């Protein structure tokens, strides 16, 4: 029998999961454990994967000059695309005005908003961990990335014999970790079945609330969805085509599995192992570029989140009837960028980060309550956009490094 391709298996799992979540809401425990196991396995592999892939990748980049060049390209891509994303959101939220005339009656109270916002400066400080074992054990991705880059770089600076030995060791380790990753990926359809059935079952009541509120919130969702669509389906493919010199459709096909996983898990970090596997094996990007662009991208480059932050903040301002002048909107753009960099690649991280924007422009923090009910579905879509942008970045950077891709 011909084996069904993985992304088809995932799509089938998604359909079954939605059906199960709607029909067997009370019995969701029978399948949700598969989702929990799958997420645990992904989390288990993230830190070893980041460490070994960055060490081997950076060691292959070799000298500081090359590393600097790669870093510059990568960050330029992140900044450029995230800014495009925010501006797209800003344009649509100004045209569609979803918040104007919204009923504030349904605003929910949220606990602990003040404590939730870790400042942007703190995020930057955390890049350098005080204890690398703490960073590894606690899954502090930015700290792990920073140490791995240092380690990979200085590995190239030691004398010949231990260098070759260590490099051989790390190459082997990376191969093993990649094999484990591919093994876990085989279970994606079952994992997604469990995760999505649970989300659907949990959201059933929220959806009813949403239908009751309807109107402006629906328009707000549409605004986010259209803006994300324009960014993911027009802006990024154009960048892939003209700057990355690759075929966006082929690249999209190469990325089906991680994109569906991002959609289902709402977590860029959890999806990272699948993204790395697909970018390397399906799109044909080298380990050198993959291991540099993707782990960083999963935490730093969040186009979808940035766009969403901007639209949400503007929606809240409109709902409270607060006029946002040009300067205010510039502040929203800048803080949305910072908030997206600071947001972790986990579900609903973006929602909490909106507090940064709201306090920057003096909007009431309770405004978040307005958009809470519809956050989960928007989270799925923005996470997919985030992962898609990371993968496009890998293609663009790989092309600029003169690599021959499979998706050209
Ligand atoms: N869930 C998103 C991600 O992992 C972050 C967010 O909440 O916007 O990419």
Image (tube, rainbow, N blue to C red):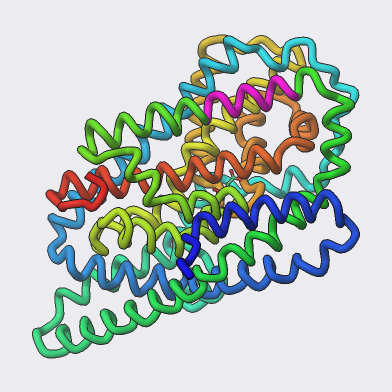
- Residue 263 image offset from top left, x and y in percent: 58, 48
Residue 298 to residue 334: above or below: below
Furthest residue to the left? 160
- Residue 395 image offset from top left, x and y in percent: 28, 47
Is residue 219 within the magenta segment?
yes
Residue 288 to residue 243: above or below: below
| Quarter of the figure with residue 101 | top right
- Residue 296 image offset from top left, x and y in percent: 39, 54
- Figure label count: 0
Q: What stretch is highlighted in magenta?
A: 218-228
- Residue 18 image offset from top left, x and y in percent: 73, 50
Q: In which quarter of the image is the C terminus?
A: top left
Residue lying at 38% horizontally and 55% vertically, measured from the top left = 294
| Quarter of the figure with residue 374 | top right
| Quarter of the figure with residue 108 | top right
Q: Is residue 62 left or right of 392 when viewed as pictured? A: left
> Looking at this view, is 395 or 372 the one in front?
395
Q: Is residue 232 left or right of 166 when viewed as pictured? A: right
Residue lying at 29% horizontally and 68% vertically, measured from the top left = 150
Is residue 314 within the magenta segment?
no
Residue lying at 65% horizontally and 24% vertically, measured from the top left = 222
């Amino acid at each position: 029998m011909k084996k069904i391709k993985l992304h088809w298996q995932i799509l089938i799992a998604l359909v079954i999961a939605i059906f199960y979540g709607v029909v067997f809401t009370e019995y969701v425990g029978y399948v949700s454990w598969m989702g929990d196991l799958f997420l645990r396995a992904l989390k288990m592999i993230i830190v070893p994967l980041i460490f070994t892939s960055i060490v081997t990748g950076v060691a292959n980049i070799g000298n500081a000059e090359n590393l600097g060049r790669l870093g510059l390209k990568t960050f330029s891509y992140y900044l450029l695309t995230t800014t495009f994303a925010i501006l797209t959101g800003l344009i649509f939220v100004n045209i569609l005005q979803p918040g104007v005339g919204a009923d504030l009656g349904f605003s929910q109270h949220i606990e602990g908003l003040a404590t939730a916002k870790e400042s942007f400066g703190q995020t930057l400080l955390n890049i350098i961990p005080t204890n690398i074992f703490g960073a590894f054990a606690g899954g502090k991705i930015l700290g792990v990335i920073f140490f791995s880059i240092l380690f990979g770089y200085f590995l190239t600076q030691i004398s010949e014999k231990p260098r070759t030995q260590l490099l051989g060791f790390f190459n082997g380790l990376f191969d093993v970790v990649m094999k484990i990753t591919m093994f876990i990926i085989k279970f994606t359809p079952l994992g997604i079945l469990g995760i999505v059935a649970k989300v659907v079952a949990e959201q059933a009541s929220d959806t009813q609330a949403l239908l009751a509120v309807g109107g402006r919130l629906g328009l707000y969702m549409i605004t986010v969805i259209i803006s994300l669509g324009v960014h993911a389906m027009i802006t990024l493919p154009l960048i892939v085509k003209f700057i990355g010199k690759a075929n966006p459709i082929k690249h999209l096909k190469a990325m089906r599995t991680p994109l569906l996983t991002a959609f289902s898990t709402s977590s860029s970090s959890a999806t990272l192992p699948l993204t790395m596997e697909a970018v390397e094996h399906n799109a044909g990007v080298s380990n050198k570029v993959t291991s540099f662009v993707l782990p960083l991208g999963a935490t730093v480059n969040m186009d979808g989140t940035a766009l969403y932050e901007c639209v949400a903040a503007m929606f809240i301002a409109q709902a409270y009837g607060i006029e946002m002048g040009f300067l205010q909107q510039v502040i929203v753009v800048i803080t949305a960028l910072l908030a997206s960099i600071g947001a972790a690649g986990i579900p609903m991280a973006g929602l909490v980060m909106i507090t940064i924007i709201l306090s920057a422009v003096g909007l009431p923090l309770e405004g978040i309550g307005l958009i809470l009910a519809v956050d989960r579905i928007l989270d799925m879509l923005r996470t997919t956009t985030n992962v898609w942008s990371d993968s496009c970045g890998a293609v663009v950077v790989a092309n600029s490094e003169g690599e021959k891709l499979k998706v050209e």
